Image (cartoon, rainbow, N blue to C red):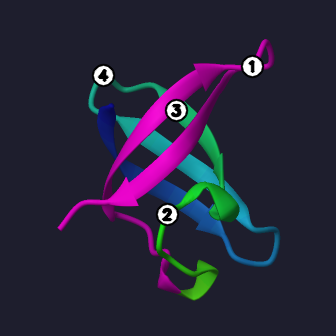
């Protein structure tokens, strides 16, 4: 798993970007966050995730909010 921070989240569209601690931006959809609802997602949250190269860029899967 990789760690990072939610850089921005667009509630109206249901997606956003995580910035990992190497400076890469990783796309995520709110449905990839385990145990959280869209309303719980705020910029700056620390998260862990699996980054998968989709051919269009990195996408985060199995995102968990760091406690």
| Mark with earlier residue (1, 4) | 4
Q: Nearer the viewer, mark 2 or mark 1?
A: 2
Q: Which residue is mark 4?
A: 22
Q: Residue at x 75, y 68 (%)?
A: 14
> Marks 2 and 1, how far apart in space?
20 Å
| Mark with earlier residue (2, 3) | 3
The image shows residue 36, relative to residue 65, as above or below, that is below
> Marks 3 and 1, how far apart in space?
14 Å
* Crowd band around label 1 with a 10 angstrom C-alpha radius: few (<14), some (14–19), many (20+): few
Marks 2/3 in contact by CB < 8 Å: the verdict is no
In percent of width and height, residue 39 lies at: 57, 87
| Mark with earlier residue (2, 4) | 4
* Crowd band around label 2 with a 10 angstrom C-alpha radius: few (<14), some (14–19), many (20+): few
Q: Which residue is mark 2?
A: 34
The image shows residue 7, relative to residue 49, as above or below, that is below
Q: Residue at x 33, y 65 (%)?
A: 45
Q: Secondary structure at mark 4?
A: loop
Q: Which residue is mark 3?
A: 25
> Marks 2 and 3, how far apart in space?
20 Å
- Residue extending farthest to the bottom is 39
Residue range highlighted in magenta: 40-67
In the rendering, which numbered label is found on residue 17? none
| Mark with earlier residue (3, 1) | 3
In percent of width and height, residue 48 lies at: 33, 46
The image shows residue 49, relative to residue 38, as above or below, that is above
For residue 13: magenta?
Answer: no
Q: Secondary structure at mark 3?
A: strand
Q: Which residue is mark 1?
A: 54
């Amino acid at each position: 798993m990789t760690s990072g921070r939610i850089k921005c989240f667009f509630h109206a569209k249901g997606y956003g970007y995580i910035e990992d601690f190497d400076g890469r931006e990783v796309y995520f959809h709110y449905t990839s966050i385990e145990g959280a609802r869209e309303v719980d997602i705020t910029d700056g949250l620390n998260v862990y995730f699996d980054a998968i190269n989709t051919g269009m860029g990195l996408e985060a899967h199995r995102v968990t909010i760091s406690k």
